[in-house]
Image (cartoon, rainbow, N blue to C red):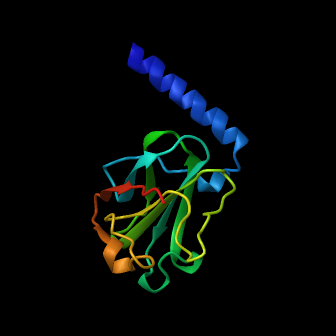
Amino acid sequence: MDKIVSAFLLLTACIASATQLDIRDYEAADECNSEFAQVRVTVTDVGEGGILTVELYNDPDNFLNKKGRERRIRIAAVKGEQRVCFNIGREGTFAVAAYHDVDGNRKLKKRWNMMPKEPFGLSNNPKMKMGFPKFKNSEFTVGDRGADITIHLLRP
């Protein structure tokens, strides 16, 4: 019973937070289902408040650019671990980027060197030394049952 009450309180907090944040209907996550081709993303180390943004890319030449992005999901950020799913309907090679927009302004804050100023992570969790990793460092293959990936957000 305690788990049900906790889940209800968490869901209520997410709904209340989402109504105050600028999260649009077309940015909603798909319902997770392991029976068909979708990318199921678990994001860890999420902070409290703001927006968690998760983006799916399929164009190696335009990785982390709007032109290469297939879809973006935004949800209210809740401390801990969150899961979002993308229906893709096909097999292929993809990469995912996630960031915690702490102030909820729908933008990733960047430092003078263009590196993230807010918690950020990529699929395969590559190290970021001098600049962002390439698509090949974050790519994964999606089969007919989809793919499950985990992204650990890095605090700047």
Check the image and name the residue furthest to the bottom.
61
Tell me what residue is drawn at x 39 percent, y 70 percent: 95
Residue 149 locus on image (x, y percent):
32, 57
Q: Is residue 32 left or right of residue 143?
A: right
**Is 2 or 152 nearer to us in this picture?**
152
**Is 35 or 93 nearer to us in this picture?**
93
Residue 140 locus on image (x, y percent):
30, 69
Q: Is residue 138 above or below residue 4?
A: below
Q: Is residue 148 above or below residue 127?
A: above
Tell me what residue is drawn at x 40 percent, y 15 percent: 2
Q: Is residue 122 left or right of residue 116?
A: left
Residue 34 locus on image (x, y percent):
31, 49
Where residue 111 sits, quadrant-wise, is: bottom right
Where residue 132 sits, quadrant-wise, is: bottom left
**Is 151 or 103 nearer to us in this picture?**
103
Tell me what residue is drawn at x 52 percent, y 39 percent: 78
Check the image and name the residue furthest to the top.
1
Query: What is the quadrant of the N terminus in the image?
Result: top left
**Is 24 or 45 nearer to us in this picture?**
45
Count of numbered marks: 0
Q: Is residue 78 above or below residue 117?
A: above
Q: Is residue 1 left or right of residue 11?
A: left
Residue 138 locus on image (x, y percent):
35, 71
